[in-house]
């Protein structure tokens, strides 16, 4: 593959996932990832700080989508309605062509403590981003924290369903259902 071809970041991500699947995460080097993608090590480091980050690309984009959707929600929207709109925006970027990549990625992350830690950090960051956007709408801190955590919990539950081999439903539909299930469960807590 010529080095000048576009989509370097995507090529690096695919190459990394292929190598992590074939050789294992620990046995794969940045040089091997760059070589497999038909790129240089320098190009790799223009896109990612280390090989761990190649698996978590897009976090900034995801955060921006969440914030934009929270800010675009009608003034009359409750905190949970605003979070639901944000989840719709986030889930919409996970198209069917990304499902196979995500399904292959999940066991690699699950098998490595440093990757699980990075995944948890990403989740915490997105919850914080959601909460901050809600606070900017005037939602009190505790309420914004709870709504943001509920939203990301729903997204995580839906994502796990989305990558199941026999699932064909869009992530948006699964996220809405998971969100409604969690809201229902939350309503039973005060009984």
Image: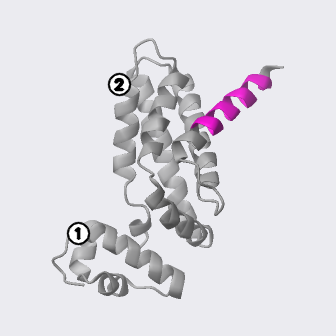
Q: Residue at x 52, y 58 (%)?
A: 119
Residue 21 visible at all: yes
Q: Which residue is mark 1?
A: 46
Q: Which one is in front, 22 or 121?
A: 22
Does dot 1 land on a helix, a strand or a loop? helix
Task: Tell me residue 152's x, y (percent).
Answer: 55, 41
Asked whether disc 2 touches disc 1, contact meaning CB atoms under 8 Å apart, the reply is no
Residue sitting farthest toward the top: 76
- The answer for how far apart the CA atoms under marks 2 and 1 are is 33 Å
Residue 46 drawn above or below residue 180? below
Q: Residue 38 vs residue 110: left or right?
A: left
Task: Tell me residue 81's x, y (percent).
Answer: 52, 23
Q: Which residue is mark 2?
A: 72
Does dot 2 land on a helix, a strand or a loop? helix
Crowding at mark 2 (Cα within 10 Å: few <14, some 14-19, many 20+): few
Task: Tell me residue 2's x, y (percent).
Answer: 19, 83
Q: Residue 57 lies in what quarter of the image?
A: bottom left
Q: Residue 88 vs residue 111: left or right?
A: left
Q: Residue at x 44, y 60 (%)?
A: 97
Q: Residue at x 45, y 11 (%)?
A: 76
Residue 106 covered by magenta stretch:
no
Residue 24 visible at all: no
Question: Magenta stretch mostly in which secondary structure?
Answer: helix
Q: Magenta residues?
A: 176-189
Task: Tell me residue 51's x, y (percent).
Answer: 40, 74
Q: Residue 189 vs residue 152: left or right?
A: right
Q: Nearer the viewer, mark 2 or mark 1?
A: 2
């Amino acid at each position: 593959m010529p080095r000048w071809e576009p989509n370097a970041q995507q090529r690096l991500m695919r190459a990394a996932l292929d190598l992590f699947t074939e050789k294992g995460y620990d046995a794969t080097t940045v040089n091997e990832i760059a070589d497999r993608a038909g790129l240089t090590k320098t190009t790799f480091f223009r896109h990612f700080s280390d090989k761990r980050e190649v698996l978590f690309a897009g976090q900034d984009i995801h955060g921006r989508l969440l914030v934009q959707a929270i800010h675009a929600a009608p003034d009359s929207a409750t905190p949970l309605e605003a979070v639901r709109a944000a989840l719709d925006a986030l889930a919409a970027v996970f198209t069917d062509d990304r499902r196979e990549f995500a399904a292959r990625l999940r066991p690699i992350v699950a098998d490595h403590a440093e990757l699980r830690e990075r995944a948890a950090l990403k989740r915490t960051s997105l919850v914080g981003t959601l909460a901050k956007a809600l606070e900017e709408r005037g939602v009190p801190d505790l309420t914004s924290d709870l709504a943001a955590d509920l939203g990301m919990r729903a997204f995580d539950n839906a994502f796990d369903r989305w990558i199941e081999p026999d699932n064909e439903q869009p992530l948006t539909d699964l996220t809405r259902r998971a969100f409604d299930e969690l809201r229902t469960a939350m309503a039973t807590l005060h009984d």
